[in-house]
Amino acid sequence: MHIDSTSRNNSINSDTEKTSDAQIKKKSVSVMPRSEKPFSPNHLPDSKGATAEIKKSTEKNTTIQPAKEKPFEQKNFSERLARAGEKARAALGSEKNQMYQTQLGILSPEAEQAVNEYSALFQAKSSDPGTRSAVRTAFDENFITPDEEQHWQDMQRKIPANTDIHPVASRRLEKVNSQELEQAIFREPGFALFAGKPEGDLFIAELTAVVNQKAATMAPTDKGMALVFRFPGTYGDVGHIAVGSLWRNEERQLRMDVSHQESMAPTATSNHVYTGRIFNTFDTAASYPTKIAPVVEGMKLFGLPSVLVFPVPFPEILAPYTQVFEEHEVIYGATDDWAPAKNAIKQRDADKTKPPSQRSGVPQNIHTETCFNVTHKTLARMYGMTTSHEPLFPSLFEKIKGFSGIPEKEFKTFKIDGKDLTMQQVATHQAHSVKAFKIVGPAWIDSGPADVNGKMRLQSRQLKFQPGQVGFPLEGRVRAFKFASETPFLKDLHLDGKPVIKDKVYTAEEAKRITYHGKEPSKDINYVVGVPLNGGAKL
């Protein structure tokens, strides 16, 4: 479904609330920018809700101790602003700063930096660019509250009159050109398939325009972009979501990093449950017994993904954050009562009666995740926020809608077994949540537009094979397809003497050579093709 970018801005990025009318009086003075490390372990998740244990950094930091009095309350202050406010308040009250103000009439360097950091966050939040609508929903952020504004004004009265407050300078993305963006994007092996082709050129041209538009209006604290990729038909007919970051390194080179979770089929080493594994590339063929990368195969049918672009303050965090969890497996599922999680819990409980050498290795802290959960967590890191685990259904799906291009009104109810069920009702029943997931999976991408829209849509088809049948025709001008049915339903289908593979792309010529060896007519076999949005089928 094609919807122009204007309607997208109205449905996803529009804000109906307004900030306070109080004006913050600002002055101007030169302050040296602070040097920032590209990554700090403090940005990693703590053990609550995390998929791995990360030890705190043992480096000695000369941090300012917060004052004993704590006026900040979570309900009145956002987490980031509260931390910055506490640091600024403590810095202003320190003995060193009191000496500077008494004897020199200026702030100490530490107080000046802390106040400027607080100022940058305050201005970023109060300016409320369009993407803040998605941030507020996903991470429980809000506009400047009365308490936040009052504290900011109280703090300003403690600052010498000749001191100016302005945001700390940072290495911002600023304008990009198509040549450097092309190099950054096609450095990813999964995307390299389209380098130098008309489709790839169009993708780069459209993405360049969007990135520059967003860079021109991003908040003072933002340094780069989060790229949310939407891939149709990655697993059968189910769409996939992934995150990229676009930023400049110390050498001013444009860089793109990738993070996403793929669904891995049960194996003996995964304790016979579906697992989710995080990767830093779309070229994941080596991790599959079939030696095909689901995302790459999907792009062969449906082309490059649609993309949503969001300015973020910490785009450089994505690569090291992903590296920590790369190849780490969790239980795959939309709710914690899905069968894979229940099976893992049984194995974990059985392990308690076995010696260590005979245990399955199932983690003690069992919870389920999907690619949407991982997208939410990685975006949180790039916004400098923390998250705790919650299953996809019912609440997290609502939180991630703004970042995935799904209109807020979509997928509120589901027709299941003849009844209209809400998301809350669906989430309490395993069979219902699985059916709801199958409804959302193929349809969520087409439910709303993106900043850069895909050029192909998925079309599902079905057929039955008869005993001894050789080949089947692809209707219309379709030149390629892939099977969407699960592997057990494909066991009697062969190509050139070898079993066919789910999610592998086959050509129309290969379709003519596929043979069916079953003794009875097959069950319905599902397959998918790519159809251009302007009609017809992909050539």
Image (cartoon, rainbow, N blue to C red):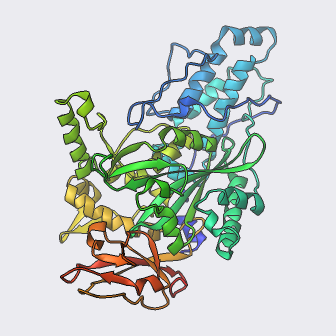
Q: Position of residue 226 (x, y in %)?
A: 59, 51
Q: Identify the residue at horizontal 19%, vertical 41% (top origin).
A: 346
Left or right of residue 112, residue 40 in this image: left
Residue 260 in sight from this viewpoint: yes
Residue 431: give x, y in percent of width and height: 20, 59
Q: Quadrant of the C terminus?
A: bottom right
Image height of 141 relative to 432, above or below: above
Q: Nearer the viewer, residue 409 or 530?
A: 530
Is 155 located above or below residue 444 in the figure?
above
The residue closer to the viewer here, 39 or 508, is 508
387 or 135: which is nearer to us?
Answer: 387
Residue at point 41% right, 84% down? 511
In the picture provided, is 126 more to the left or to the right than 422?
Answer: right
Which one is nearer the viewer's eye here, 87 or 357?
A: 357
Using the rendered view, name the quadrant where residue 383 is placed.
top right
Choose top left, top right, bottom left or bottom right for residue 50: top left
